[in-house]
Image (tube, helix red, strand yellow):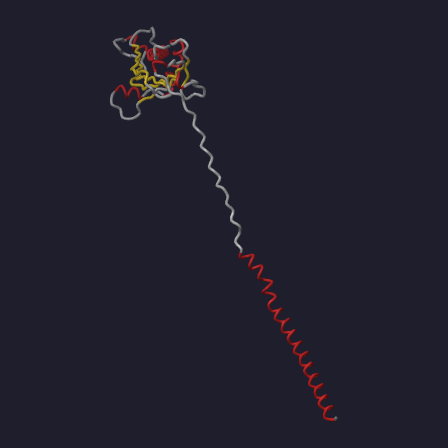
Amino acid sequence: MRNVGSRGLCYVLVLCSGMALAQSNSGWWSQNRSGDAAATEPATAASPASEVSAVPPPVTHEQPVPAPLPTPMPVASPALPLSQTRFDCVEVARFEVNDGLITSKEEARAAMIPAERLAEIQRSVAGNIPGKIAGMRAALAGATTGCPDPQRTVLLTGRIVDFKKGNQALRYFVGFGAGAQKFSVMARAVRKSDGALLAEEDVTDRKVGGWIGGDADKGLDDFGEKVATFVKRALPATR
């Protein structure tokens, strides 16, 4: 009876010791598990940020903007043949002189003509054109207001090939060609729109003697009238 009681008591002691050990192990296990979880938690929390940064931005397929089309240039109407063109205006350019190599005494005299004299010749020619050609207008080339329609405009240019100022007293008292006055120009008339040649001619005015028509202003006006007559002859017969 005593032996049975001793064994029962030993069994109870062993059982209590096992339960205490189990509880102790359970506490250690839970602590280790919580520590492991705490150690791995920052990495787990950081992983979404790294995943977001690794995601490439969305690709957008934008359509290229087309370049603007060039503005079409206005198409000029084809020029009529010279024989069918009705000219109504003349632009008179200032006549030129040879300022390069001189090959003759006439060119040397022409090169000595004053610039203001060239301007006077230009105005004299322009002033004589309306009176010499009915219905024709004239303008100075390069002026603010010119002829309105280049296809109906004659551009008059020229090169002075000889010039003598002259001396009225010598013409009267000496004669025999002394003191002769001379204007000579190689005149050229073209259509302004395309440069088509109408005519080219050496136009010359001389004053060789006497008082009548012997002054410089009269000689200049006579020369302008002769150039205007040249333009009139150059115009097509359609006028």
Which image quarter: residue 187?
A: top left
Q: Left or right: where does residue 21 sit relative to residue 75?
A: right
Foreground of the two, 198 or 144: 198
Residue 124: tell me if it is visible. Answer: no
The quarter of the displayed image where residue 77 is located: top left
**Residue 130 occupies quadrant:** top left
**Could you tell me residue 27's position as x and y percent?**
67, 76
The image position of residue 201, as x and y in percent, is 29, 15
Q: Residue furthest front?
A: 1
Residue furthest to the bottom in view is 2
Name the quadrant of the N terminus: bottom right
Along the viewing direction, whichever of 42 and 81 lies nearer the viewer: 42
Q: Residue at x 55, y 57 (%)?
A: 53
When the figure is inspected, residue 168 is found, relative to residue 104, above or below; the finding is above
For the C terminus, give its image quadrant: top left
Q: Is residue 193 above or below residue 238?
A: below
Query: What residue sits 53% from the left and 57% below the top?
Result: 54
Residue 61 versus residue 138 in the image, above or below: below
Q: Residue 179: x and y, percent?
A: 29, 12
Decide if residue 69 is in sight here.
yes
Give the image location of residue 108, x and y in percent.
28, 21
Q: Is residue 68 left or right of residue 107?
A: right
Image label count: 0
